[in-house]
Image (cartoon, rainbow, N blue to C red):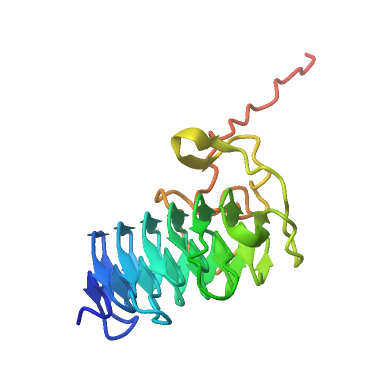
Amino acid sequence: DDQMGGGVLCTSVSAVVSNCVIAGNFAGHYGGGAYSGTLINCVITDNQAINLFIGGLGQGGGAYASDLRNCIIATNRANPQGGGACFGSLTNCLVAYNSAKFGGGACAATVVNCTVVQNGAYDDGLAGPAGGGGVSGGYTLNSIVVQNTGPSGLTNFASPAMSYCCTVPDPGGEGNITNDPAFKDFASGNYRLGSNSPCINAGTNLPPDLSVDLDGRPRVVDAVVDVGAYEYQHLPFIIVPPVSHSVL
């Protein structure tokens, strides 16, 4: 069906797709890259969900109603909503360089421990404001949502429900911060945390099944989860026993 699931079409989230590259696909309505299914350790890139008719729905350029875990979702496009993903959930994912009118990165999705950066919401000239270059609607937890673009001032988020996130401006809600996340090398696309990042140990701990981050390394270091898709991994501390100064 060319209207949904251009690359992968699943009947439910119980279907698992892992360690795949889903690239260069198209759907006229839902899920340019994938429709439904649980996608693990996948790269979802250069897919489109575009409806060319006025008033038509193109949702989820990368994925629609999917459970995305430890995935890279990049350079996908949808019109009007969910350039990277629409509905469903994203956990430990990097969401970058996607675009849509609403929710350039993700729209109406549950976004947990993700890094959502350099996505865009654009104005297509039709009625109604565009917005949410990073995320639009849904719920976002323990995530970095920065350096996204969009008209109407709604650059990083629109209609936010966010907790323990790093974004600007302050969306309200518990545990959110507006600091620079201090990526290792933003200019070269390295969105791992630098040693001085305020996102280290700034999240709220997750259920125990989330054992690794996007790099496959321990998800929780120093007892508290970091904000974003990557956990900061420091060198192990070496405890030197005290020197004995006994007097004979």
Residue 209 in view in this figure: no
Residue 234 in view in this figure: yes
x%, y% of residue 65? 40, 78
In the depicted structure, whether residue 187 falls above or below residue 123? above
- As drawn, the residue found furthest toward the top would be 248
Q: Please state if 79 lies on the left or on the right of 226 as rendered.
A: left
Q: Please state if 42 lies on the left or on the right of 178 as rendered.
A: left
x%, y% of residue 150? 57, 57
Q: Residue at position x 28%, y 79% from top?
A: 4
From the viewer's side, name the closer residue of 181 and 169: 169
Q: Residue at position x 30%, y 62% from top?
A: 47
From the viewer's side, name the closer residue of 44 and 59: 59
Image quadrant occupied by the N terminus: bottom left
- As drawn, the residue found furthest toward the right would be 247
Image quadrant occupied by the C terminus: top right
x%, y% of residue 126? 50, 73
Q: Residue at position x 33%, y 74% from top?
A: 52
Q: Quadrant of residue 234?
A: top right
